[in-house]
Image (tube, rainbow, N blue to C red):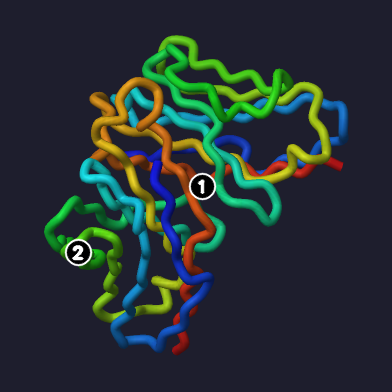
Protein backbone atom coordinates (compact mmCIF):
# COMPACT_ATOMS: atom_id res chain seq x y z
CA UNK A 1 0.00 0.00 0.00
CA UNK A 2 1.38 3.40 -0.96
CA UNK A 3 1.99 5.84 1.84
CA UNK A 4 1.32 9.55 1.94
CA UNK A 5 3.15 11.29 -0.87
CA UNK A 6 4.06 14.93 -1.19
CA UNK A 7 5.23 16.97 -4.13
CA UNK A 8 7.62 18.62 -4.61
CA UNK A 9 10.19 17.33 -2.17
CA UNK A 10 12.01 20.66 -2.29
CA UNK A 11 11.10 24.11 -3.51
CA UNK A 12 13.21 27.25 -3.64
CA UNK A 13 11.38 30.45 -4.56
CA UNK A 14 11.85 34.16 -4.19
CA UNK A 15 9.90 36.33 -1.83
CA UNK A 16 6.65 37.41 -3.42
CA UNK A 17 6.30 34.37 -5.63
CA UNK A 18 3.62 31.72 -5.38
CA UNK A 19 4.19 28.09 -4.47
CA UNK A 20 1.73 25.22 -4.47
CA UNK A 21 2.38 22.10 -2.44
CA UNK A 22 0.53 18.87 -3.11
CA UNK A 23 -0.35 15.98 -0.84
CA UNK A 24 -1.76 12.62 -1.85
CA UNK A 25 -3.11 10.79 1.19
CA UNK A 26 -3.38 7.06 1.64
CA UNK A 27 -6.31 5.75 -0.38
CA UNK A 28 -9.51 5.68 1.64
CA UNK A 29 -8.30 8.09 4.30
CA UNK A 30 -10.95 10.75 4.82
CA UNK A 31 -8.83 12.78 7.22
CA UNK A 32 -6.02 14.90 5.82
CA UNK A 33 -3.83 17.23 7.86
CA UNK A 34 -1.24 19.85 7.06
CA UNK A 35 1.56 20.68 9.51
CA UNK A 36 4.74 22.68 9.21
CA UNK A 37 8.01 23.18 11.01
CA UNK A 38 9.71 26.49 10.57
CA UNK A 39 13.39 26.83 11.44
CA UNK A 40 14.13 26.08 15.08
CA UNK A 41 10.49 25.69 16.03
CA UNK A 42 8.20 22.80 16.85
CA UNK A 43 5.99 21.06 14.33
CA UNK A 44 2.74 23.05 14.21
CA UNK A 45 -0.70 22.07 12.99
CA UNK A 46 -2.12 24.09 10.11
CA UNK A 47 -5.44 22.53 9.19
CA UNK A 48 -7.56 19.41 9.01
CA UNK A 49 -9.82 18.21 6.20
CA UNK A 50 -12.50 15.59 6.53
CA UNK A 51 -13.08 14.56 2.94
CA UNK A 52 -13.40 17.88 1.10
CA UNK A 53 -14.52 19.92 4.10
CA UNK A 54 -12.26 21.99 6.33
CA UNK A 55 -12.83 20.60 9.81
CA UNK A 56 -10.31 22.79 11.62
CA UNK A 57 -8.24 25.57 10.10
CA UNK A 58 -7.25 27.19 13.36
CA UNK A 59 -3.53 26.81 12.65
CA UNK A 60 -3.43 28.63 9.33
CA UNK A 61 -1.10 31.57 9.92
CA UNK A 62 -2.74 34.14 7.65
CA UNK A 63 -4.69 34.63 4.45
CA UNK A 64 -1.65 34.10 2.27
CA UNK A 65 -2.19 30.38 2.81
CA UNK A 66 -4.97 28.61 0.92
CA UNK A 67 -5.67 24.91 1.27
CA UNK A 68 -8.02 22.94 -0.93
CA UNK A 69 -9.14 19.36 -1.22
CA UNK A 70 -11.46 19.17 -4.17
CA UNK A 71 -13.22 15.81 -4.45
CA UNK A 72 -11.88 14.70 -1.11
CA UNK A 73 -8.76 13.08 -2.53
CA UNK A 74 -5.50 14.97 -2.87
CA UNK A 75 -4.94 18.36 -1.29
CA UNK A 76 -3.01 21.45 -2.26
CA UNK A 77 -1.57 24.15 -0.06
CA UNK A 78 -0.84 27.40 -1.86
CA UNK A 79 1.25 30.19 -0.42
CA UNK A 80 0.72 33.51 -2.20
CA UNK A 81 2.73 35.67 -1.94
CA UNK A 82 5.48 33.79 -0.13
CA UNK A 83 7.42 35.55 2.62
CA UNK A 84 10.80 34.72 4.13
CA UNK A 85 9.20 33.42 7.33
CA UNK A 86 7.29 30.79 5.36
CA UNK A 87 10.49 28.80 4.90
CA UNK A 88 10.37 25.42 6.56
CA UNK A 89 9.19 21.87 6.10
CA UNK A 90 5.53 21.26 5.31
CA UNK A 91 4.15 17.88 6.28
CA UNK A 92 0.95 16.24 5.23
CA UNK A 93 -0.67 13.41 7.18
CA UNK A 94 -3.74 11.28 6.68
CA UNK A 95 -5.83 8.92 8.77
CA UNK A 96 -8.80 6.63 8.22
CA UNK A 97 -12.44 7.67 8.76
CA UNK A 98 -13.82 8.05 12.32
CA UNK A 99 -11.34 10.44 13.83
CA UNK A 100 -10.70 9.64 17.45
CA UNK A 101 -7.99 10.15 20.01
CA UNK A 102 -6.81 6.59 19.31
CA UNK A 103 -6.34 7.36 15.63
CA UNK A 104 -2.93 7.00 14.01
CA UNK A 105 -1.82 9.65 11.58
CA UNK A 106 0.43 8.65 8.69
CA UNK A 107 2.83 11.33 7.59
CA UNK A 108 4.40 12.08 4.26
CA UNK A 109 8.11 12.90 3.87
CA UNK A 110 7.46 16.62 3.74
CA UNK A 111 8.16 19.44 1.32
CA UNK A 112 11.14 21.60 2.14
CA UNK A 113 10.35 25.18 1.20
CA UNK A 114 13.00 27.88 1.08
CA UNK A 115 11.94 31.45 0.39
CA UNK A 116 14.81 33.74 -0.59
CA UNK B 1 -4.34 19.24 24.94
CA UNK B 2 -2.43 18.79 28.18
CA UNK B 3 1.25 19.66 28.17
CA UNK B 4 4.08 17.12 28.19
CA UNK B 5 7.69 17.53 29.30
CA UNK B 6 10.56 15.52 27.83
CA UNK B 7 14.34 15.74 28.15
CA UNK B 8 15.91 17.59 25.24
CA UNK B 9 18.29 14.77 24.41
CA UNK B 10 19.41 11.29 25.39
CA UNK B 11 22.16 8.98 24.26
CA UNK B 12 22.39 5.23 24.04
CA UNK B 13 24.67 2.53 22.73
CA UNK B 14 23.59 0.15 20.05
CA UNK B 15 21.99 -3.08 21.28
CA UNK B 16 21.22 -1.56 24.69
CA UNK B 17 17.75 -0.71 26.04
CA UNK B 18 16.60 2.89 26.00
CA UNK B 19 14.06 4.42 28.35
CA UNK B 20 12.61 7.70 27.13
CA UNK B 21 10.65 9.52 29.85
CA UNK B 22 7.70 11.85 29.51
CA UNK B 23 6.03 13.84 32.26
CA UNK B 24 2.39 14.83 31.91
CA UNK B 25 1.35 15.89 35.39
CA UNK B 26 -1.82 17.65 34.18
CA UNK B 27 -3.11 14.66 32.24
CA UNK B 28 -6.87 14.17 32.38
CA UNK B 29 -8.66 10.87 32.73
CA UNK B 30 -9.65 10.90 29.08
CA UNK B 31 -6.21 11.64 27.60
CA UNK B 32 -4.53 8.96 25.53
CA UNK B 33 -0.72 8.96 25.56
CA UNK B 34 0.76 8.75 22.06
CA UNK B 35 4.37 8.48 20.94
CA UNK B 36 5.60 9.45 17.52
CA UNK B 37 9.14 9.68 16.24
CA UNK B 38 10.79 11.54 13.41
CA UNK B 39 13.74 9.97 11.68
CA UNK B 40 16.18 12.32 9.92
CA UNK B 41 14.74 13.87 6.75
CA UNK B 42 11.43 12.02 7.15
CA UNK B 43 7.98 12.82 8.41
CA UNK B 44 6.89 11.76 11.90
CA UNK B 45 5.79 8.17 12.34
CA UNK B 46 3.53 6.56 14.91
CA UNK B 47 5.24 4.42 17.52
CA UNK B 48 2.72 3.42 20.17
CA UNK B 49 -0.15 4.67 22.31
CA UNK B 50 -1.90 3.75 25.55
CA UNK B 51 -4.44 4.90 28.10
CA UNK B 52 -3.79 3.18 31.44
CA UNK B 53 -2.19 -0.22 30.95
CA UNK B 54 1.29 -0.90 29.67
CA UNK B 55 1.39 -1.62 25.94
CA UNK B 56 3.73 -3.57 23.70
CA UNK B 57 4.08 -3.65 19.95
CA UNK B 58 6.77 -4.67 17.50
CA UNK B 59 8.50 -1.31 17.76
CA UNK B 60 8.48 -0.53 21.46
CA UNK B 61 6.83 -0.81 24.85
CA UNK B 62 4.97 1.90 26.71
CA UNK B 63 5.05 1.88 30.49
CA UNK B 64 2.45 4.14 32.11
CA UNK B 65 2.73 5.15 35.75
CA UNK B 66 -0.11 4.15 38.01
CA UNK B 67 -1.14 7.79 38.54
CA UNK B 68 -0.68 8.40 34.77
CA UNK B 69 1.36 11.52 35.42
CA UNK B 70 4.32 10.07 33.59
CA UNK B 71 5.13 7.44 31.01
CA UNK B 72 8.22 5.82 29.54
CA UNK B 73 8.81 4.66 26.00
CA UNK B 74 11.09 1.63 26.02
CA UNK B 75 13.17 0.54 23.07
CA UNK B 76 14.38 -2.88 24.09
CA UNK B 77 17.47 -2.99 21.89
CA UNK B 78 18.42 0.28 20.28
CA UNK B 79 19.71 0.21 16.74
CA UNK B 80 21.29 2.97 14.70
CA UNK B 81 17.95 3.25 12.86
CA UNK B 82 16.28 4.29 16.11
CA UNK B 83 18.18 7.58 16.17
CA UNK B 84 15.37 10.11 15.89
CA UNK B 85 13.37 12.77 17.70
CA UNK B 86 10.76 11.13 19.93
CA UNK B 87 7.54 12.97 20.74
CA UNK B 88 5.15 12.26 23.59
CA UNK B 89 1.67 13.62 22.79
CA UNK B 90 -1.60 13.61 24.73
CA UNK B 91 -4.97 13.37 22.97
CA UNK B 92 -8.34 13.70 24.65
CA UNK B 93 -10.83 11.05 23.55
CA UNK B 94 -13.72 13.32 24.42
CA UNK B 95 -12.42 16.54 22.89
CA UNK B 96 -14.72 16.06 19.94
CA UNK B 97 -15.68 18.75 17.49
CA UNK B 98 -12.74 20.36 15.79
CA UNK B 99 -10.17 19.96 18.51
CA UNK B 100 -8.91 16.41 18.75
CA UNK B 101 -7.96 15.79 15.11
CA UNK B 102 -4.65 17.60 15.30
CA UNK B 103 -1.49 16.39 16.99
CA UNK B 104 0.22 18.92 19.26
CA UNK B 105 3.99 18.41 19.07
CA UNK B 106 6.42 19.60 21.71
CA UNK B 107 10.19 19.81 21.40
CA UNK B 108 10.62 16.07 21.78
CA UNK B 109 13.72 14.12 22.82
CA UNK B 110 16.61 13.78 20.40
CA UNK B 111 17.90 10.23 20.74
CA UNK B 112 21.46 9.55 19.64
CA UNK B 113 22.53 5.93 19.26
CA UNK B 114 26.25 5.17 19.31
CA UNK B 115 27.66 2.15 17.45
Give residue A39's position: percent from left, percent from top: 70, 52
Q: In which quarter of the image is residue A115?
A: top right
Which residue is denoted by mark 1 in the rendering?
A: A109
Q: How crowded is mark 2: few (under 14 residues within 10 Å), some or many (20 or more)?
A: few
Give residue A90's position: percent from left, percent from top: 60, 40
Q: What residue is shown at x 46% (from left), y 83% (from top)?
A: B11
Query: Left or right of A74: which side holds B46?
Result: left
Q: Residues within 10 Å of mark 1 (few under 14, many from 20)?
A: many
Q: In which quarter of the image is residue A104?
A: top left
Q: In which quarter of the image is residue B100?
A: top left
**Alpha-carbon distance for marks 1 and 2?**
22 Å
Q: Quadrant of the N terminus of chain A?
A: top left
State the mark number for residue B40. none
Nearer the observer, A59 or A16: A59
The correct choice, above or below, for B102 with respect to B90 in the image is above
Q: Is mark 1 on a helix, strand or loop?
A: loop
Q: What residue is shown at x 42% (from left), y 41% (from top)?
A: B103
Query: Left or right of A15: which side holds A92?
Result: left
Give residue A49's position: percent from left, percent from top: 43, 21
The chain letter under disc 2 is: B
Q: What residue is shown at x 17% (from left), y 61% (from top)?
A: B57
Q: What element carries label 2?
A: loop
The correct choice, above or below, for B39 with respect to A17 in the image is below
Q: What residue is shown at x 39% (from left), y 46% (from top)?
A: B2
State the mark number for residue B58. 2
1 vs 2, front mark: 2
Amino acid sequence: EAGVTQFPSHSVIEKGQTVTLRCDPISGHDNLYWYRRVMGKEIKFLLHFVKESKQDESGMPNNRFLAERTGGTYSTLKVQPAELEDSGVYFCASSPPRTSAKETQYFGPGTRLLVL
Amino acid sequence: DAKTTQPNSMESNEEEPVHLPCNHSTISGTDYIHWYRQLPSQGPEYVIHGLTSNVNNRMASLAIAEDRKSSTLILHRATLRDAAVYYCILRDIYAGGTSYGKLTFGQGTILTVHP
